[in-house]
Amino acid sequence: MRRILEAQRHQVLHESEGEAGLKTAIEEVPDIVLIDLGLPDIDGQTLIAFMKRAPELQDVPLVAVTAWPEDTARQMAEAYGCDGYISKPINTRTFPDQIAAFIRK
């Protein structure tokens, strides 16, 4: 994902743990947050809830990235309050357009 986004001239900030990701997102206020629902330190649902409550992130799309089957991924993203989801494995051809669409919303 990083290589694809950087090739599209996006600056990518990456954190491998949810707590660090929350801190970075609040400090940097990115255009979009891609959230893996299976993080080592905090579950995706809790992380999304924290991000949704952060005033700095109110207008930032939160997008779940998951390997769950598509129906499950959609249900989880909706239940957690995400603005959408992207299924793994990532389709490298459609991924840049998916990101652009979420940012435009």
Image (cartoon, grey):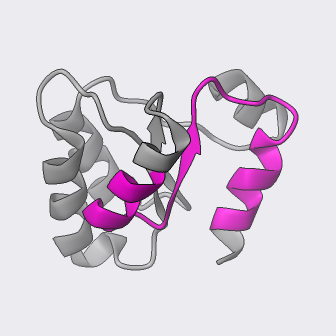
Residue name at image x 44 percent, y 46 percent: 73
Residue 91 seen: yes
Image quadrant holding the C terminus, namely: bottom right
Camera-side residue of 45 and 57: 45
Compared across the picture, whether 94 is left or right of 62 comes to right
Percent x, y of residue 26: 28, 58
For residue 22, above or below residue 38: below
Residue 77 picture quarter: bottom left
Compared across the picture, whether 105 is left or right of 80 comes to right
Residue name at image x 47 percent, y 27 percent: 67
Percent x, y of residue 47: 19, 49
Looking at the image, the residue that sits furthest to the front is 71
Looking at the image, the residue that sits furthest to the right is 93
Percent x, y of residue 50: 15, 60
The residues colored magenta run 74-102
Residue 34 seen: no
Q: Count up the numbered dots.
A: 0
Camera-side residue of 24 and 4: 4
Image quadrant holding the N terminus, namely: top right
Residue name at image x 48 percent, y 39 percent: 65
Compared across the picture, whether 91 is left or right of 69 comes to right
Percent x, y of residue 7: 83, 31
Compared across the picture, whether 81 is left or right of 67 comes to left
Residue name at image x 28 percent, y 28 percent: 38
Camera-side residue of 27 and 80: 80
For residue 67, above or below residue 57: above
Residue 98 falls inside the magenta stretch: yes
For residue 79, above or below residue 45: below
